[in-house]
Image (cartoon, grey):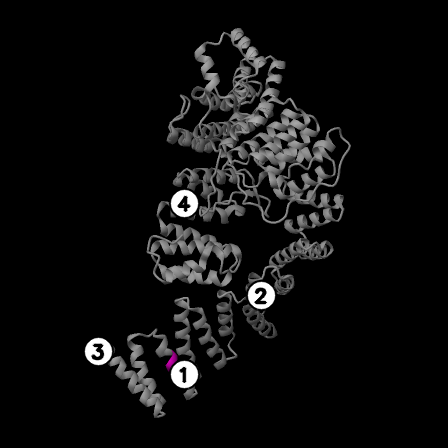
Amino acid sequence: MNGKLDRVKIIEQAERYVRAGKIKEAIIEYEKLLEDDPADVSINNIVGDLYVRLGQSERAIKSFEKVASEYERKSQYSQALAILKKICRLNPENPQYFIRMADLYSRQGFTAEAKQEYLRIAEKYLRAKQVEKAIELYEKVVRLDKDDLNLKMQLAALYKLDGRTDRAVNELLEAAELKLAAGLIDEAHKLLLEARKLNPESPRAGLKLAQVLRLKGQAEEAMDLARAALEKNPNDLEALNFLGNVYFEEGKFSLAKEVFTKILNYYPLNVNARYKLGRINLGEGEVDRAYEYFEPLIDSYLKKRKEDKAIGLLGLILTVRKDHLPSMEKMAAIFRGNKDLSRLEQVDRAILAELKKIGEKTKMLPVYAELLKLKPSDEKLAKEYRELKKELMITEEQEAVYDTWVPSKDQEEEIQAGLAQADVYLQEGLTRLARRVIEGLLLKYPNDSMIKQKLNYIDSLKTQLSEEELIKKVEKATAIETQVLRPAKGKRQEKEERKTSLPFNEQILGEDKVNPLDIFRDTGIVPIITTDGREKKYYDLQENIRAELAMISAIYQRQKKGVTTQFEKELSSIVSEFRKGVRDKIPEEDFQIHLQLGLAFMEQGLLDEAIEEFNIASKDKSLILETLTLISHCYRLKGNMEEAERWLNRAIKLVAPGTDQYFALMFDLGLIYEQTGDLEKALSIYRDIQSWNPTYRSVSERIERLSNSAGTPGNPLN
């Protein structure tokens, strides 16, 4: 064929045949054009219409399928939908075409039309006793409208009919959640009883039922269910938190204390436990102990520039003991940073009064200096300051330092990072390590009051550990990383209704100044509590989530900034010695610690070490999905896409197709294909995800950009 001229001639000849009623001859002419371009939508559509005129529906459908597929490939869904409607009219008995049409409705956001088609075909499958196929369609409908309670109930009934008990229980639990959200507690109760009947061993169903019973005022029954869950799994974090909260609300503070302490043994940065223990200790008048629980939370707020919420926690402490020096000094630092000079003066005067009372004269010098800057005309202050300097024999050079030194923003961040690292060691009783960190800071910033305060606090501690305990504590402290919760959606926690008669209870334990969810929102220390009772990190590297406070991370950052002391070695040496200690002292079957080590290594770019730790952790069946995904991600970071794909495919085989988890993993697989330049495979995956949820991680925009060749191999669109 000679290009455009021959094409025009063929089309003219074919049209003459059509006008003459010679349909077969016309088709032959048009098919000549398809030899050069089999995907030509215009010609295929004409050929399909001509086959319809001949009454050859099957051939017409084949031509129309080519047209619809090409339109879908180009993301021209309206045109593809029009062609599929033609096909459905020609073959109304084939449900696959109607399902495909519903998929297109879904991609375009026509939810009502998509639901109608899915449900109509599902009914046909049910009449034909094809329950599995009906379930697939109901799953699609539920994904389109997750708030439709009736659909969830129907899907649960189908799962039960098909023998998929676990899936049925999950749907009933989600339906119960919707009932609770609507305030229909009794109806939620019925659903949960049905779930328990299907699977009496389900920990999620048991705990959810316990929560409902608690709402109905049946605290004892709720606690029984939580205790039963803990008999099966003593480390079930969700059950521990629930039981501790009920004890707390019921005024059983000694029992609550026992439960929350156990939580902190496994998860030292668990917010709920740390907050509740702080409040219990305040109620008992143990202010210093309460401050220890609150301090990491306060430091996190200062780091996140959430000063008002840090002040809220400090306010709880000062309500009980208004002269608590560490709380006042922390509050002064906040007011100083905010340039709130009026309140800074008030706090400085209170600090000065307390320092006088306890005879800490050296610490009084910077407070006097600051107060005189705030109130230069205060003769009484000036006289006291002169007399104190004379008594302590302060030179003019030393006096200038006390009068003028204020840390810069970078210096303040560095100081806060060092204090946070020391807090990790202190939580594990490693006072020597904490002291070395603080002494290193003090060498560089000898006049910072917060560093001095922390050093004095460490000096007041007396911790005796055996060699074996010390090694365990070091390993645990090294594995600790700050844990993350995305800003909580929806509701605030209900107010605690019950007040008790303990001396401080009404004032502190019933205090409503600070809501836990409110306090810890947007901090870097809130744990994610998963339904299997474990506390895990969620690493979504598309977002700005960073791990904090691991020892290796802290030393790495300090070396990078040049803030090192004689006791800090090269990072490679630290990693080598640390891993040797792990091999010698941590049992291989302690999979949770190996997972945490892998995460710490991955965050610092030590990918081979991370992969090795994840491989060990994957021997725990409950961690295998998470570890396979993390290993795949490590290989992606290394640029080894073949291995990344292989490990990710292993993870995908472990999840049920059509679930949220499945599509999240498939999206990652699409990214791998994109990076390797296999755009067709990537697009195919993205289109499946779009049918499930058109708004998921901007998948629709990604499809459009890839379809228009905006993406280039090896450079996936973000």
**Callout 1, which amino acid?**
Asp
Q: Nearer the viewer, residue 116 or 674?
A: 116
Residue on which the image places disc 1:
49
**Left or right of residue 2, residue 158 in this image:** right
Local crowd at mark 1 within 10 Å, few (<14), some, or many (≥20)?
many
Q: Nearer the viewer, residue 636 or 5?
A: 5
* Mark 2 to mark 3 CA distance (whole Å): 53 Å
Residue 78: x %, y % from top left: 45, 71
* Mark 4 to mark 1 CA distance (whole Å): 53 Å
Residue 567: x %, y % from top left: 42, 22
Q: Can residue 235 be seen from the camera position used here?
A: no
Do the residues under discs 3 and 4 have CB atoms within 8 angstroms?
no
Image: magenta residue range: 45-49
Which comes before the other along the chain, label 1 or label 2? 1
Residue on which the image places disc 3:
2
Which comes before the other along the chain, label 2 or label 3? 3
- The residue at the far left in this view is 2
* Mark 4 to mark 2 CA distance (whole Å): 36 Å
Q: Secondary structure at mark 2?
A: helix
**Callout 4, which amino acid?**
Cys
**Quarter location, residue 135:** bottom right
Residue on which the image places disc 2:
138
Q: Secondary structure at mark 4?
A: helix
Residue on which the image places disc 4:
634
